[in-house]
Image: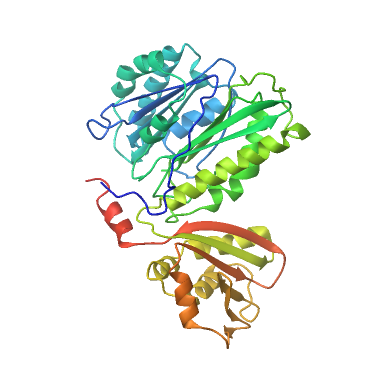
Amino acid sequence: MTSVSPLAPKTLPDMLAISGVRIATAKAGIKYKNRVDLMAMVFDEGTAVAGVFTRSKCPSAPVELCREHLSGGKARILVVNAGNANAFTGKKGRHTTAVAATAAAGAAGCAEDEVFLSSTGVIGEPLDPSHFERHLADMVARAEDGLWNEAAHAIMTTDTFPKMVTRTVRLGDAEVIINGIAKGAGMIAPDMATMLSYVATDAPVSAAVLQALLDRFTPTTFNAVTVDSDTSTSDTLLAFATGKAEGAPAIADPDDPRLADFATAFGECLQELALMIVKDGEGATKLVRVDVTGAVSDNSAKRIAMAIANSPLVKTAITGEDANWGRVVMAVGKAGEPADRDRLAIWFGDLLLASEGERREDYSEEAASAYMANEEIVIRADIGLGDGSFTAWTCNLTKEYVAINGDYRS
């Protein structure tokens, strides 16, 4: 059993129950015996849904199903399994999703296009549909309020801690709740949006509002993190709104000014979940923030930031607590974006290490090395060409990452 990440939160949040959401989990034996690996989240009728998914050209069968069902804008049940990604499983995989959707719809008493599925785990192994047929009816029957901790545990694979967040915020004259859970530790370079995340609220907001919020916040949260530069076949981020908060105004327009506080809290939830995924990066011992400023555009800044954040040489230097700022220069230069060697400036924390094409005269190896001993590292590269900026988040690369992934299918 992998030890809990040293970057894990010291305490888990007390997750509030959300009216209109009931949860159940089961030990289905999908990959391991006696492990909780199946989760069902059941929603009251009328629950709105929105989502973003992987841009992988080899998406999993559940991702394809979710995309098809999303246009309806309504959800009654979410089913997630761990241990098998049901990706690159051909006709067998599509058959399994069809069987699972039928079983879920029957259990929840809803239409099949109100069913949403996710699978995470090994790619290329057929997933037995009987796991869903055997368990879903009972799970829906015994689902209950408040089991968010159990849900977060059920969707874990190589995660070392459950990822949960909760917020309460005013909407109109009422108080509403936002809860979120996520899983992810490796194969993390979301491009949408093996990363899964689910956010639910009792706020009476429409599918259009949820989609607008996801589109607004995903680029700077889930799409701003990377563990190993590998985009999963299964990346899924879904948001659900039951509308059960008493006294809250129904909001259908994404531009409604009453959404301001809710939107802020929603974005905070996505940011916190995304950072927990980085903090649980396989084998990670350090959280790394990469700030790029002075680029010709924000998009250019993002590409440079991700080149730095994804560089194995940068990430291993951080593991060795080596203030090797030259590797940052290398990553900027290889990004394929406009840059000028003689305008580039590199900071580690508050330490300006290099500028105007060379190392600073007041550079202190001792001070730089001392900074690299911190658990959280900030690298900044100012390109010196414009106003574009972007912040990416990553973690270091350790021997443990190799060990985990070398034995992943064993």
At which x and y percent is residue 279? 44, 52
> Looking at the picture, does residue 281 appear above or below residue 239?
below
Left or right: residue 408 versus residue 274 is left
- Which scheme is used to colour this image of the protein? rainbow
> Looking at the picture, does residue 180 appear above or below residue 251?
below
At which x and y percent is residue 161? 38, 43
**Taking the image as drawn, is residue 256 in sight?**
no
Residue at point 58% right, 88% down?
361
At which x and y percent is residue 138? 35, 15
At which x and y percent is residue 212? 67, 36
Left or right: residue 232 versus residue 246 is left
Left or right: residue 56 versus residue 248 is left
> Looking at the picture, does residue 244 appear above or below residue 80?
above
Residue at point 25% right, 29% down?
29
Residue at point 45% right, 70% down?
372
Residue at point 62% right, 44% down?
217
The image quarter containing residue 346 is: bottom right
Depth check: give the residue in front, 166 or 47.
166
Left or right: residue 407 versus residue 38 is left
The single residue placed furthest to the bottom in the displayed view is 361
**Taking the image as drawn, is residue 65 in sight?**
yes
The image quarter containing residue 201 is: top right
